[in-house]
Amino acid sequence: MTNSVGFALADEAATVNMGKQLAKLMEQGAVIYLHGDLGAGKTTLTRGIVQGFGHQGKVKSPTYTLVEPYQLDKADIYHFDLYRLGDPEELEYMGIRDYFSPHAICVVEWPEKGGEFIPTPDLDVTLRYEGEARAILINSLTERGHSIVEKLKSTQ
């Protein structure tokens, strides 16, 4: 049951705004995979999602810590960056399954490095360069993801 929507993102501000828009459409938890080359906007999109739930501070990539938690009034958000992960089994030792509760928002950069230790995403997002701009393709892989994509389509 894949459902997709794509957009052009003119600049960093447009990428942040797309994240904020996604945050508005998440009524409950979600697992979001982010794919794209280095610098394609994965952390920028995550910044928009986290800010969309009310976070006022910085949003940094957890490249060395693997996970950056944000306990907010409206949601618990966990931002994972698996780029430097040596072995997917390391995730088991850090208690990765505890983060993926039904009501948490889990955003995972470089999910292919997590193997079977991370659950199927609701949204599978690819960001890519298009000249100076970016393009985003959002695929839904679950019922919850399908609902988010349908809402996103109706707002455009």
Image (tube, grey):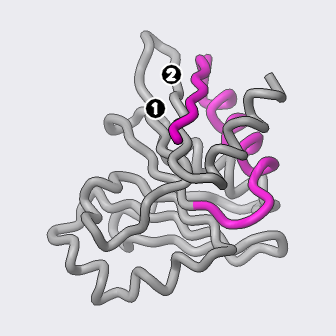
Q: Quadrant of residue 130?
A: top left
Any mark on residue 96, and which? none
Kind of residue at badge 1: Leu
Q: Quadrant of residue 91?
A: bottom left
The residue at 71%/46% (across/down) is: 147
Q: Magenta stretch? A: 1-30
| Rendered view: 81 above or below 2 | below
* Extreme residue toward the left, this view: 86
Residue under label 1: 127
Kind of residue at badge 2: Arg
Residue 120 lies left or right of residue 149; in this view the side is left
| Rendered view: 105 above or below 83 | below
Find out whether residue 27 is within the magenta segment: yes
Residue 39 lies left or right of residue 135; in this view the side is left
| Rendered view: 92 above or below 125 | below
Secondary structure at numbered mark 2: strand
Residue under label 2: 134
- What is the distance, in whole Å, between disc 2 and disc 1 at their CAs? 7 Å
The residue at 46%/32% (across/down) is: 127
Q: Dot 1, crowdedness within 10 Å: few (<14), some or many (≥20)?
A: many
Secondary structure at numbered mark 1: strand
* Residue 117: x %, y % from top left: 31, 73
* Residue 148: x %, y % from top left: 71, 45
Q: Quadrant of residue 54?
A: bottom right
Q: Dot 2, crowdedness within 10 Å: few (<14), some or many (≥20)?
A: some
* Extreme residue toward the front, this view: 1
| Residues under numbered marks 2 and 1 in contact, where contact means CB atoms less than 8 Å apart | yes
Near-viewer residue (2 or 148)? 2
> Image quadrant for the C terminus?
top right
* Residue 12: x %, y % from top left: 60, 30
Find out whether residue 35 is within the magenta segment: no
